[in-house]
Image (tube, coloured by chain):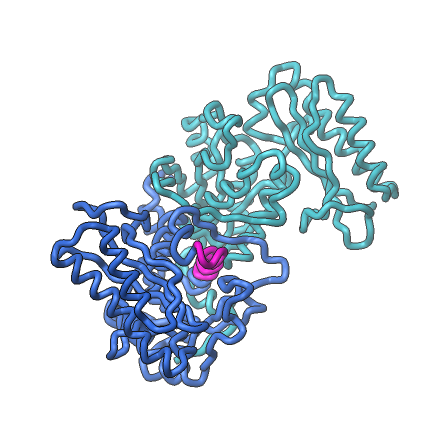
Chain colours: A cyan, B blue
Amino acid sequence: MKIVAPSQAMQQWSRQVAQQHVLVPTMGALHEGHAALIRRAREIADPSATVVVSIFVNPIQFGVNEDLSCYPRTLAADVALCEKENVDFLFYPTVEEMYAADASVRISETQLSQRLCGASRPGHFSGMATVVAKLFNIVAPNIAIFGEKDWQQLAIIRRFVHDLNFPIEIIGHPTVREKDGLAMSSRNAYLTPEKRAVAPKIYQALQAVAAARATGEKNIAILLMAARMALEDIPGAMIDYIEIMNEETLAPLSEISENSKPRLFVAVKLGETRLIDNIALHAS
Amino acid sequence: MKIVAPSQAMQQWSRQVAQQHVLVPTMGALHEGHAALIRRAREIADPSATVVVSIFVNPIQFGVNEDLSCYPRTLAADVALCEKENVDFLFYPTVEEMYAADASVRISETQLSQRLCGASRPGHFSGMATVVAKLFNIVAPNIAIFGEKDWQQLAIIRRFVHDLNFPIEIIGHPTVREKDGLAMSSRNAYLTPEKRAVAPKIYQALQAVAAARATGEKNIAILLMAARMALEDIPGAMIDYIEIMNEETLAPLSEISENSKPRLFVAVKLGETRLIDNIALHAS
């Protein structure tokens, strides 16, 4: 009998997957940001690895007044994009198959998920973590890739993968942007031409704050005020939140010091469309 | 590119584990009941399968006033029992390794875990499910075996394995009993000689109710009353609960019909020791 103490050794032994595979979970309505995640998957994996894309619009991560019913569904175009990017497997389960009528189990996270989008969207991150755990168990990837636009989501996934010992490496991919700087999002399709025209000002506001930080500004209140003034200048914008947090713990910062890893997070409504973005506040 | 719709097909492809393995999770203080689970593991698995026993006294499933600090720890005897039963791997992680200081994720179940022991022990089943999910991810068994004495635990594990798509077959093993009928439990070691002498009366009470049911009694109130009277007759016994539930859904039953799958569940304190037991109420 072998006696094994460290979890890592046990896990290494337990998961002798013949072929490496990489998962890119999506809700469909694929755009160039997703394509970048897929290319990244191919890049980082072994040459023989299999790239799996999942498409599932997860009902339990939408609130009752949110956009579940009108969330864009573009399966034919999604399949074409996946074919073009040499995806090996496209997994698109049905809602009925994913959620039994008596389903009663959730993944709950009690620290990182309380603030930012968690405050505006109660239950969202629990629903997200639950479906991602399901996808991890179904696909059993070695690696999974998520976009950094949804930074809080990425932080929560890293946390539950660690806390629940999923044997999966989580990779965050930098936000892919339109030429004018707007963070790519399936929800950008909701924007009217007028709102689309002003939407890039969100990222311009983030860049202005990052520039102030890079030139030495350390005062959190001043940085937040700069963000607020710039965002309030966008015609028709309603600010949901503007926060500067430690980018790993998502704890709010009262001052910037050596190890505080500050990142600015914003959520803004343009008409009915809620957009989020974030930027690192590095000293130069 | 292959397009996969059913989760089962995806999962089958994803988990090509070279060698089958079977997990018997325990909190140590191993007794003949655990030995029976280990032998069952060997019996049902492929001849080449690996049998893994885990020993971990899981702090997060104990309440603040419960017996975590005095829970019996008998590692040398446990190792000997595992050697004798030809266990291949004994996994015994440390608490520090299993729970990071910033751990913030739990598995929560909102239906089956509310009643019976869940009512008396808030947080217990969430703590249990969380550690079992961790063990599943670390050991990655094909099969895991649990005793039916902890019937509610078993039902909750079946539910979260299903709801979160863990690719693991869960097997319940019938309660192993002392010659006098007392359900084997590591906690029996707490009993004073006087309490140990009367403890078999718990199972005798269950048997009497099952016999009444087998001879045609369908009235839930009468069956519950019979259980209560028998248990109240045990010197020094304090009843925590007596319930008749559907054994799959753990929904309380108001009457016994064709498909109600009735099972009697009891929890009784003898001195400081809380004992649980259960029995199927089949018609003969």
Image quarter where the N terminus of chain B lies is: top left
Q: Nearer the viewer, residue B48 or A154?
A: A154
Residue B53 percent location from the top left of the image = 39, 72
Above or below, B60 against A40 in this view is below
Residue B95 percent location from the top left of the image = 55, 69
Above or below, B19 against B9 in this view is below
Q: Residue at x 35, y 44 (%)?
A: B7
Q: Residue at x 73, y 25 (%)?
A: A201
B128 drawn magenta: yes
Q: Nearer the viewer, residue A189 or A176?
A: A189
Q: Nearer the viewer, residue B122 or A204?
A: B122
Q: What range of the chain is rendered magenta?
A: B119-133
Residue A27 percent location from the top left of the image = 48, 34
Q: Is residue B18 visible?
A: no
Q: Residue at x 30, y 72 (%)?
A: B183
B8 drawn magenta: no
Can you name the residue that lies furthest to the right here? A216
Above or below, A145 against B203 in this view is above
Q: Residue at x 43, y 30 (%)?
A: A80
Query: Would you identify the image quadrant in which residue A57 lies?
Result: top left
Instruction: Tell me which secondary structure the magenta stretch mostly adopts.
Output: helix
Q: Is residue B138 left or right of residue B200?
A: right
